[in-house]
Image (spheres, helix red, strand yellow):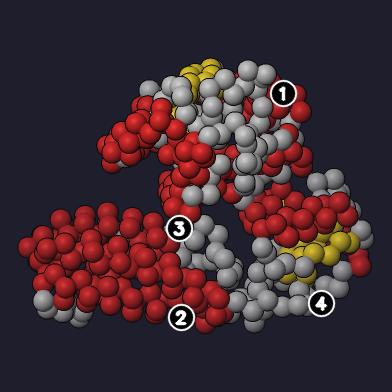
Amino acid sequence: MHLPRNIYGVYHPGHKVTLFMSHLFLLCASFYAASVKRLGVAPEFLSIEFTAMATIIMVSMFFGGVFTSVHISPRPKLPLKTFFIVLSSALPSLVFVYLMGPERFTALLGRGVYPIALLAFAILAVSNQYLWNRIFYHPSTEKWTVVIGSGSDKNKIQTLLSTRGHNLKVKGFVDIKSLNISSDDISSIVLSPKYLACAEEKRILMLMRLKGVPIFSLSDFLESFFFLIPVSDIDSEWFIRSGGFSMLESDSSLRFKRFIDVVAATAILFIASPVILVTCLLIPISSKGTVFFKQTRVGLNGEFFTLIKFRTMHMNAEDDGAKWAQENDSRIYAFGSFLRRTRIDELPQCWNILRGEMSLVGPRPERPVFTQELSKEIPYYDLRHVVKPGLTGWAQVSYPYGSSVEDALKKLQFDLYYIKNYSLVLDLNIMLRTALVMLRRSGR
């Protein structure tokens, strides 16, 4: 039987079975530990109640894609996806409990056993995913991703590989007829945007596809494996025909996102209130001037709004005009640098979120003076304004702080990916990755 291949490594049939069995073992272990800790007794694993609960959780993981991907990578796409899929299984589980009668599930729900066990399993499941992906990952030195039609596209992919940490070998072909159809050393084929296949080349591509070799357009390849939209390789036709952008088509998605924004911003302000109070006291001591910094930014549909932050620069730092923030920027005072590294300076923007001017997650709001310049230099730059700007975003956690037109172009590619592929899981991944940035104090 011909096994499907992928750009990461050889597909192994034992991967899914091992992953399933190890997840099931960890699920049982999590409930055992929680029950013993909270109730002093072990759960009855063969009971109908536990079997049903475990089945719901494992089925939720199956439909969430934990066991269905053919890609084996030591660095899974959106690795925290498994974490949120496990937590989301709580909803169907609790509905089942309600229908069957809560009194039957005392041993699983009493004294917080269920939430403790589910959270523990969610954490263990992510680690388990990493472990077995690394064990089953077998990169083959004989496998290639073939780029048909343009050497420049090959170079573009190789540049991304060098910066994103993938183990993928890329080979450029001008003539597709030189491909050996019987060869198993091709893992995937990427078609350049301007490539037009003749009848014979289409036949060859069809045979390769039927052999299980994935075939991508360049934009789909970069979107699927680098999580960005290549601005220079798309046009208006791409926007018309491409899938995604569900957030822009669904009022319910926008309303739900707004609900999450309000709840999260309120919670952040409440939890961080001691930090906010201390910061308000320390800023005037560290640098003479106001506590808060207000600046006009471009928001939804290009409308202006006033962004609020803790002041991190000396007063009158831009008397000689607007400038990009730089590393080791002399305009930033010492405590302001700490506020930036920890992202504490961003906390007042929760007020902008409550006012409806910003979202928790979205493209970073830019200043009008820079927006005007970037709109002239970068194609489709204004498309980032079709959604509300965010306190954090996919570009912020995927690319270092930008200080040039080139950086703005690269960040736009991540912003467009976010707009096209918005989901609650992606938002949660971004928020957790932002939290890690704050803990590492690697902001600017």
**What is the C-alpha distance between the residues marked 1 and 3?**
37 Å
From the image, tell me which residue sits under label 1: 373
**What is the C-alpha distance between the residues marked 1 and 2?**
53 Å
From the image, tell me which residue sits under label 3: 81
Q: Quadrant of residue 8?
A: bottom right
**What is the C-alpha distance between the residues marked 4 and 2?**
31 Å
Q: Are marks 4 and 2 in contact (CB under 8 Å)?
A: no
Query: Which residue, as the protein is rendered here, is positioned at the far left?
Result: 103
**What is the C-alpha distance between the residues marked 3 and 4?**
37 Å
Disc on res. 18:
2
Kind of residue indicated by mark 3: Lys
Task: Give SS at disc 4.
Answer: loop
Q: Nearer the viewer, residue 408 or 413?
A: 408
The tag earlier along the polypeptide, 4 or 2, is 2
Kind of residue indicated by mark 1: Glu
From the image, tell me which residue sits under label 4: 182
Give percent across and percent down for residue 94: 21, 57
In the rendered view, would you say 296 is above or below 32? Answer: above
The tag earlier along the polypeptide, 1 or 3, is 3
The tag earlier along the polypeptide, 4 or 1, is 4
Q: Which is more foreground, mark 4 or mark 2?
A: 2
In the rendered view, would you say 326 is above or below 205? Answer: above
The tag earlier along the polypeptide, 3 or 4, is 3
Q: Residue 421, can we see it?
A: no
In the rendered view, would you say 153 is above or below 31? Answer: above
**What is the C-alpha distance between the residues marked 2 and 3?**
19 Å
Which image quadrant: the C terminus? top right
- What residue is shown at x 54% (from left), y 27% (from top)? 314
